[in-house]
Every structure is written in structure tokens, then in C-alpha cells.
Image (cartoon, rainbow, N blue to C red):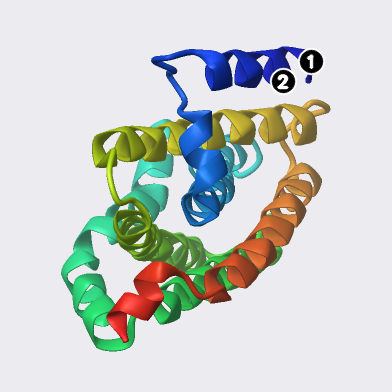
């Protein structure tokens, strides 16, 4: 914690900071975008990194089979991107992000049904549901980011990607804690408990009005 505070203080004072703390302090809307994306990335990467371990260790699937089972989680975002673009134009950013957060929450809740006897088709279906919010959240938050920044868009976009990596790092910390005693169904459900709490926070953040939402009216 002290190291993090020292880093932020140094960035605040530096004339050419890696993280523009002054810009974030002056722009709460932009800070909200990054915080939202960090939380989403934690949930998303817990699924990407955690489910394969459970499928292989607890269910006994081969690595190739595991890759096929979770493929929809990674693939659905790209498939639905054109539809998400239309949805943002038609219904606005806030509606899209609330829908994304709700699907994320539903997908996480469905993992609670995973166990030794869960059918393969259900695993694939849940992975597909979890994959849908990827495109919705990315396009929705990028739209909010564009309207929140008046200048320095390149820096803002770089920090947006940094938020993704920070969320990914946090997800590995979550997995290290819940899987410390072994990769079993109980540990999987502990992971999902964390994901559900964060998904609920994401739904709340998604419902907040921003400059992008006002612009889309």
C-alpha cells in the first residue's frame, strides 16, 4: 500500500508521468471508466483463468477439450460486436452497460450449478453467456471514455488498456487465494462468490449517467 501511494505521489509530481494522476483527479468520469473496467477485467479473467483449471483438474477434461469448452467465453465478444454497436446507437451506452453487467451476473450465478455431474452443453452455454458482456463492456466504456476526454485521448486510451491488465493481475491474486488448498468445486464456488460481488458493483456503476449517455440522448 505504501509503495502504491508513493508511486501515485511520484506520478502526480512528475512532468511526464506514466499514469497521468492530475488528469484523473480532474476528470472523475474518466476515473469511473477505468475503475469499471478494472472490476470487469477481474471477473472476466477469473473466468478465463479459473474455469479451465477446474475443468481439467476436477472434471478430468484434457487441455484440448478444455479449450473447446471455454472457447465461447473468448469468442462471443467478437461475434456480437456489430450488434453491440447497433445497440449503443439505438438504446444508448447506459442501457448497454446495464445489460452487460446483468448478463455477467447471471453467468457468474450459473457457475454455482457446476459440479461433478454438470452436463457439457451447460458448461458451453454458461461460457457463451459470460462471453457476451466482453464486447458490450468494451464498446460501452470506450464510448464513455471518448466523451469524457477533451484532450489527451491517446494517453486516456493507453490507461484504458492498463486498466485491463491491472484487472487481469488482480484476478490471478483471487485465484491464488481460492485455489491455494486445491482446485475443487468448493474452491470454484469461492471464486464465483468474489465474481458475483464484483458483478453486482458493475451493474450499479453501469446505471450511473455519464457524459456519453447525455450525448447519446
Question: Is residue 131 visible to us here?
Answer: yes
Residue that carries the numbered disc 2 in the rendered image = 5
Q: How many marks?
A: 2
Residue that appears at 43% across and 31% down: 162
Pointer 2 and pointer 1: residues touching (CB < 8 Å)? yes
> Residue 169: x percent and y percent?
57, 28
Q: Quadrant of residue 73?
A: bottom left
Residue that appears at 61% across and 36% down: 171
Mark 2 residue crowding within 10 angstroms, few (<14) / some (14–19) / many (20+): few
Vertical order, 48 against 199 (above or below): above
> Residue 33: x percent and y percent?
48, 53
Left or right: 49 as drawn, with respect to 195: left
Vertical order, 44 against 53 (above or below): below
- In the picture, the quarter occupied by the N terminus is top right
Residue that appears at 69% across and 13% down: 6
Vertical order, 212 against 182 (above or below): below
> Residue 20: x percent and y percent?
46, 28
Vertical order, 197 against 92 (above or below): above
Mark 1 residue crowding within 10 angstroms, few (<14) / some (14–19) / many (20+): few
Question: Is residue 52 visible to us here?
Answer: no
> Residue 187: x percent and y percent?
77, 42
Residue that appears at 34% across and 47% down: 68
Left or right: 129 as drawn, with respect to 111: left
Nearest to the observer: residue 167 or residue 65? 167
- In the picture, the quarter occupied by the C terminus is bottom left
Q: Quadrant of residue 129?
A: bottom left
Residue that carries the numbered disc 1 in the rendered image = 2
Q: CA distance from mark 2 to mark 1?
A: 5 Å
Secondary structure of the residue carrying tag 2 is helix
Nearest to the observer: residue 105 or residue 163? 163
In the picture as drawn, the residue positioned furthest to the left comes out as 82
Amino acid at each position: 500500500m505504501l509503495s502504491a501511494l508513493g508511486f501515485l505521489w511520484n506520478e502526480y509530481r512528475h512532468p511526464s508521468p506514466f499514469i497521468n494522476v492530475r488528469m484523473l483527479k480532474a476528470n472523475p468520469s474518466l476515473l469511473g471508466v477505468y475503475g469499471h473496467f478494472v472490476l470487469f477485467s477481474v471477473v472476466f479473467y477469473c473466468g478465463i483463468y479459473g474455469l479451465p483449471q477446474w475443468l481439467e483438474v476436477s472434471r478430468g477434461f484434457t487441455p484440448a477439450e478444455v479449450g473447446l469448452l471455454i472457447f465461447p467465453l473468448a469468442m462471443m465478444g467478437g461475434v456480437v460486436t456489430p450488434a453491440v454497436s447497433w445497440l449503443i446507437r439505438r438504446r444508448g451506452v447506459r442501457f448497454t452497460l446495464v445489460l452487460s453487467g446483468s448478463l455477467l451476473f447471471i453467468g457468474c450465478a450459473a457457475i454455482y450449478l457446476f459440479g461433478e455431474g454438470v452436463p457439457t452443453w451447460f458448461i458451453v452455454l454458461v461460457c457463451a453467456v459470460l462471453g457476451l458482456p466482453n464486447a458490450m463492456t468494451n464498446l460501452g466504456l470506450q464510448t464513455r471514455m471518448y466523451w469524457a476526454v477533451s484532450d489527451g485521448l491517446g494517453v486516456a486510451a493507453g490507461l484504458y488498456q492498463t486498466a485491463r491488465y491491472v484487472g487481469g493481475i488482480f484476478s490471478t491474486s483471487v485465484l491464488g487465494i481460492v485455489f491455494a488448498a486445491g482446485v475443487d468445486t468448493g474452491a470454484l464456488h469461492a471464486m464465483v462468490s468474489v465474481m458475483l460481488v464484483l458483478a453486482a458493483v458493475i451493474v450499479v456503476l453501469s446505471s450511473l449517467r455519464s457524459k456519453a449517455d447525455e450525448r447519446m440522448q
